[in-house]
Amino acid sequence: MMPPSRGGVLRSLRKLSRNPGAFVGAWVLLVLLVAAAAGRSLAPYDPNQTSVGAQLGAPERAHPLGTDRYGRDMLSRILAGARLSLPIGLLAVSFAMVFGTLLGLVTGYFGGRVDALGTKVIDIMLGFPPIMLALLIIAILGIGISNVVLAVGIGAVPRFARIVRGATISARENVYVEAARAIGAGPARLLIGHILPNVAAPIIVLATLYTGRAILESSALGFLGMGVQPPTPEWGSMLSEGREFMRHAWWLMVFPGTALFLTVVSINLLGDFLRQVLDPRLRGA
Amino acid sequence: MSAYVLRRLLGTVPVLVVATTVAFLVLQLIPGDPVNLMLAGVPASQELRENLRKRLGLDQPIHVQYVSFVARAARGDLGISFRTRQPVAQIVAQQLPATLELAAGGMLVGITFGLSMGIVAGLRPNSPIDTLTMLVAIVGISIPGYWTAMLLIYFFGLRLGWVPIVGTGLPALILPSIVVGSFAVGDIARLVRSSIMEVRNEDYIRTARSKGLPERRVVLRHALRNAMIPVVTLIGLQMGLFVGGGVITETVFARQGVGKLLVDAILEKDYPVVQAVILLITAGYVYANFAVDILYSVLDPRIRYQ
């Protein structure tokens, strides 16, 4: 499948406006991205600024989303959290996309022993429950933001590899690949210049759908105390704090969770839409 | 059939070998000396350290350590916890029933709700219940499981007081099961819906209808049975969700279980326990999928001959 032309983009945008779910998703995501980008100037307070006397304050005019146990403003912390949760998810997916695509391209293109070995690696990685793989990597590498990116990213590599391998196998038989090979193009040029653009659609779809999952998984690691460490505001670790004060301060658990849920649901609505537009083969998959 | 079972059984070996190797490597790859971790900062003489090292077999070359690790693991000896000094196998065995209970509860919830919503939606596409099913599906994959758990605890446990949020027994299992099951409801419902939509116009369904069978029977005996094949596979793939769901859910509900044991062990750097749980969960996952594969081939004999 070719990447959409300019006319195709316009058509896709028109389709987007007719798909209510994707339309809402796109808007919510846009607002979240702008809020995350402009977080510092939008936020009424410094996210780490504590305030004696304002601890565990319910939502009111000065603090629309309330304050936490140190009197820090929840709205400011949630905005700051967006600047962390979104990039962590995106980085993890990018990692998985790059390595998964490479693995898939190479195994699918060369076939034979390379493919047998690559497929075995993919199967073995898929044999581990995803959260286990992430926890295992954290257990070995230790707690921290970059390790969360790796832990979540590595778990998604085999999923990308499997899709790309399949797409590559069918793309390599195409006439234009044969033509390029006939005029002397080497494997690297064939893979990057001719096959990759033609397997791009399923990669984009999978990457979108996986971004939501990666954000959820990394926030879960934060919630378990294995990701971003306090006082840095991250949605997962904020929710872990919310759990402690659930009885007295519902806002600590409701607002960060809502932010996380809205982000992921809009990414998923958009991903579902992309799947329908870009890749009819994946429909209903 | 037995050739197929054997082939599938052999297929599980590489994953187990890798899992064992990875579990073994955990102790080799962590930064720092395991003996220090075991002593947990307690001052000890050099002699005591050397003795401990010898007793743990850490003075042996790495391949000897590996062979002895595998041999001991095969006998069910998974070492001693750094923290509690209890045999790890014993600790894990104590936590296992609670986890199995939760996984079973979660599967029950996921399959019951997923199947019924999928059937109704598939029989009446584009109806309000169909829209609701699709909405539940997309919410299901987008909502953080631990947040669902917290909201349920808050409303049904703290506010309404309908169910206990801690403790053991069936009532305390309700909310955690809903959480673990909710991970799978959307996916199952979506798949059942599309399977039912696919088969509902088949000739054998029309035949069943035209010979005057009641609708219930047509759906349950004819449509659902054929729609179940992909669903069973999906449930197999969902095992990871039930396992992973356990890790998070047990922590939120402060329940006993293997998942919580793993999280605590990682945070406390109790590596022998980490090794044991990795082995156990991976093996459980692999054999659950193996069982699903066999069930799959019973439902659809064509699979066996591929």
Image (cartoon, rainbow, N blue to C red):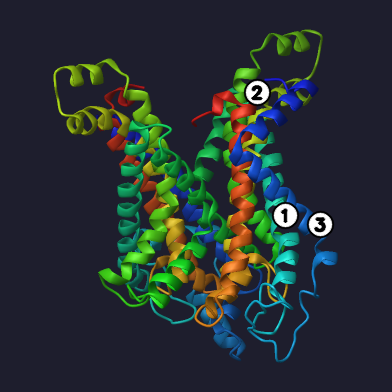
Kindly indicate the quadrant of the structure image that contains residue A96.
top right
- Residue A37's label in the rendered image is 3
Residue at image position (65%, 67%) is A142
Q: Which chain is home to disc 2?
A: A
Q: Residues within 10 Å of mark 2 (few under 14, many from 20)?
A: many
Q: Which mark is residue A32?
A: 1
Mark 3 is on which residue type?
Ala
Q: How many marks?
A: 3
Name the N-terminal-most of marks 3 and 2.
3
Please indicate, yes or no, whether residue B28 appears anywhere in the rendered image.
no
Disc 2: which residue: A109
Q: The N terminus of chain A lies in which quarter of the figure? A: top right
Instruction: Tell me if B303 is positioned left or right of A188 in this view.
Output: left
Type of amino acid under label 1: Leu
Residue B78 at x, y percent in the picture: 41, 67
Q: Name the spot of residue B31 as percent of width and height, x first.
A: 66, 69
Residue A271 lies, with reference to residue A214, above or below; the image says: above
Chain for mark 3?
A
Q: Residue A38 in the image: x percent, y percent?
A: 83, 59
